[in-house]
Amino acid sequence: MADLYLKNEDFLRKKQLPLVLLRRDPQPEFPLHSHESSELVIVTRGQGKHILPGSERNISAGDVFLIHGKTRHAYSDLHDLALYNIMFDLKEFNHPLFALQGKSLLPSLFLLKVPDGGVHLTGEEFQAVFELVRKMEDEQTSAAEDSDAMISALFMQLILLLGRSAVSAGITRKSPQYSRVDELVDEITEHSARKWSRAEMAKKAGMSLSTLTRHFRERTGVSPLEYLIRVRLKKASVLLQNPELGLAEIADMTGFTDSNYFCRLFRKYFGISPGKYRQK
């Protein structure tokens, strides 16, 4: 029998915010399965075993770890285990990971990736993380117009806090290739309006084009050029909130030399034209 595979549409219902927080209290035993989305797990009570193909680890209250998209895993031998799952899609252009213009959250996020990463929180660190998660849960049930923006901001704060905790605990990036990819991600994010070629990206990362593309996809879920386009579109969506800027001007400011091409891409990714997005 094939493992259960959970698609994004099973959880991520809102296109504008492909992120959802789920409370599992208690967490039931669950067979091997995988998700199209990535999953940040925060254990709040009890203990049990988290199983990966070829390995397993004991988990208890205070453990926080990341399960990257499509990773097979399961829970067993549970004793009053309760946790929060934050499901999110790295590939989505409008994901909170792209809201920090100039700095990616990937380095902090991937310090938590199993089987090698993750952090155990106690005392004040655990309380700070728990409070952020509770605020996210409150915003998720809120009918406030700005709840999506607040959830994004809280999620970013959560990842940065967890990254600091992981570094303090001595967790480091194991792979130098990923360090170079993270540096390239930051540079593309900060200077997304400039002209980039695939050859230049590979040279900056010190890799062949095929190696860079493979590692970049493992890290972000998309190719370097796709990432660049999505960052540009995210920045354009912010600039559209300024009524004094025309569409051609915004296209030029974000690195699109052809405003018609910009409009076609914007409609493709957002499902709406730039003009209607501005009206909304």
Image (tube, helix red, strand yellow):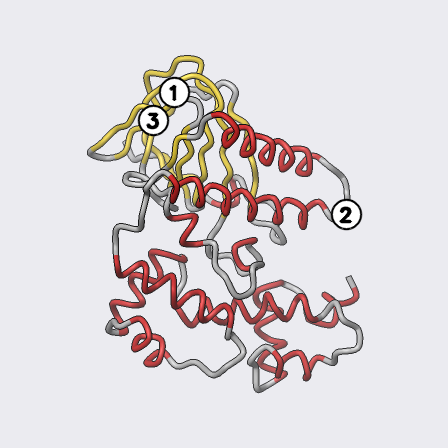
Label 1 neighbour load within 10 Å: few <14, some 14-19, many 20+:
some
Residue to which mark 3 is pinned: 31
Q: Position of residue 71 (x, y in %)?
A: 33, 42
Q: Position of residue 64 (x, y in %)?
A: 42, 33
Against 201, residue 174 (above or below) is: above
Task: Compare residues 260 and 157 and report the one nearer the observer.
Answer: 157
The image's mark for residue 174 is none
Q: Quadrant of the C terminus?
A: bottom right
CA gap, disc 3 and disc 2: 38 Å
Of tags 1 and 2, the one toward the viewer is 2
Residue 274 placement (x, y as % from top left): 69, 71
Q: Which residue occupies the foreground of this view, 171 or 254? A: 171
- Asked if residue 167 is positioned above or below residue 179 in the image, the reply reads above
Dot 1: what SS?
A: loop
Work out whether mark 1 precedes mark 2 in sequence or the reverse, and give the earlier one: 1
| Total numbered badges shown on the rendered structure | 3
* Real-space Cα separation, disc 3 to disc 1, in angstroms: 7 Å
- Tell me whether circle 3 and circle 2 mark residues in contact (CB < 8 Å): no
Q: Amino acid at mark 2?
A: Glu
**Is 1 on the left-hand or right-hand side of 240?**
left
Amino acid residing under circle 3 = Pro
In contact (CB < 8 Å): disc 3 and disc 1: yes
Label 2 sits on residue = 145
* Residue tagged 1: 29
Q: Residues within 10 Å of mark 2 (few under 14, many from 20)?
A: few
Residue at mark 1 to residue at mark 2: CA–CA distance: 37 Å
Quadrant placement of the N terminus: top left
Q: Amino acid at mark 1?
A: Glu
Relative to 28, say whether 190 is above or below.
below
Element on which disc 2 rests? loop
